Amino acid sequence: MIPSTNIESETQPFVLVQSTAEEYRINTFDNHLEWGGNLTQQQYYDKGMAGNDVHGGHRGWHLKSSTSGEIVASCETFTQDAMYCMGGSAEIKVGKCDSVASVYVQPKYRGKGYATMMMKALNSVSRSQGTLYIDLYSDVDPKVYEKCGWNQIETPTLKLDTTQELGFTPVDTTGSNITIITNANIQSVIDKDHNNCVADLKKVASESDPSTYIFSTLFTLEKFFWFTIQHRLSYEFQNLEAPTEYGRFLNDSYIIWSHNCRDNQLEILKFHSTNLDEFKILLQSAYNEAKKHDLKTVYMWWSTNRIGHVVQFLESTKYQIEIRKNSIPMVTAFPPSGIESTNYKWISCEKFQWV
Ligand SMILES: CC(C)(COP(=O)(O)OP(=O)(O)OC[C@H]1O[C@@H](n2cnc3c(N)ncnc32)[C@H](O)[C@@H]1OP(=O)(O)O)[C@@H](O)C(=O)NCCC(=O)NCCS
């Protein structure tokens, strides 16, 4: 059964509907205008579908007039694995969260409150389905979403310009203890990341009061493929050879990246380092990889709750950390019923969360 919810506007009733495959195709062809870049509409759609095929839990949505049937706005959501715990407790529980993407209002209908209407309805559908939280990344003024119940999350950002020298004395990145991450061994790194995620939740919980609801999205194999398959297709559409190395690990430290040739940047999906020496090896490996593939920027953002020590490591380099002003992660927390919570901490808003 397709979930829907009736929302009355001042003048006419609207309904939020889960899109059929054909409606989703039409909505995606429409929003190519915003996000299609230099791809054709079909390539843009195929790229999205390739990602959706490897990432379960994808749903298209639209807001339509229940009188004329016309679609005025659309978006999509991805349901993902998540974990949570309460402050002061070491008990970790699992659940699901939703991430919203491709929020789009038909140009002729903008400024009439349809985005607000759709996002409020989506929020209540997600809450009613028992998700732990719903997140998104605002590419526009965050007030658009704040009005619908989303809260901004401060996000430190690092951008390395690969046309500039590295910000520290180069280190050896070819040691025999350094392993290249490929499709063949990525699962072992994801397993390490799950353990770290649990450890981070427990650490934050031990430092928080009992009313704090603490949650994190899990980085999964399907999320890794969601990125890399779409980015690989972008290379193929341009008749370029797609890269096959997705990061490095050594000891308990690792970096996972994806090559975004459309935006000319190497995007750091996950970064975990236990000491400064390993931090530098991993960061330089990313810099080298971006240069090798003519990508102008290495782009990383992270949650201060999760890898705050990165800031200390970066302070020993010349790099400036910026706080993102655009594309800001935003979240609405839905503490499970029976849980009294007055505040929350989201500890996983790294790049991998972006959908
Ligand atoms: C951004 C977008 C979804 C907004 O849709 P909309 O239906 O026009 O938004 P609403 O009418 O519900 O506006 C809600 C509020 O946000 C404001 N707002 C809308 N678009 C805005 C923008 N681009 N920048 C700043 N504020 C904006 C409105 O002024 C309104 O504020 P108000 O209540 O104080 O008047 C729509 O312009 C769009 O589809 N843009 C292209 C795709 C895009 O950028 N999507 C967002 C990706 S995160």
Image (cartoon, rainbow, N blue to C red):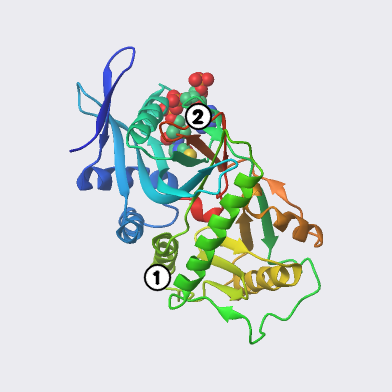
Residue drawn at point x = 21 percent, y = 43 percent: 20
Q: Tell me where residue 262 appears, x and y as whole percent.
A: 49, 60
- Left or right: residue 169 versus residue 289 is right
Task: Count residues near mark 2 (Cα–Cα under 10 Å), then give few for <14, some for 14-19, many for 20+.
Answer: few
* Secondary structure type for disc 2: loop
Q: Residue flagged by tag 1: what amino acid is it?
A: Glu
Vertical placement of residue 103 versus 168, above or below = above
- Left or right: residue 270 versus residue 186 is right
> How far apart are labels 1 and 2 at the CA level?
50 Å
The circle drawn on residue 340 is 2
Q: Tell me where residue 131 appears, x and y as whole percent.
A: 38, 40
Residue drawn at point x = 45 percent, y = 74 percent: 240
The circle drawn on residue 255 is none
Vertical placement of residue 195 versus 289, above or below = above
> Is any atom of residue 265 visible in this view?
no
* Secondary structure type for disc 1: helix
Q: Residue flagged by tag 2: what amino acid is it?
A: Glu
Q: Residue furthest top?
A: 10
Q: Quadrant of residue 200?
A: bottom right
Where the N terminus falls, by quadrant?
Answer: top left
Of residues 90 and 219, which is closer to you in this image?
A: 90
Reading the chain from its start, which is encountered first: label 1 or label 2? 1
Q: Tell me where residue 351 appears, x and y as whole percent.
A: 54, 54
- Left or right: residue 146 versus residue 72 is right
- Residue position for label 1: 236
Viewer-nearest of labels 1 and 2?
A: 2
- Left or right: residue 321 versus residue 145 is right
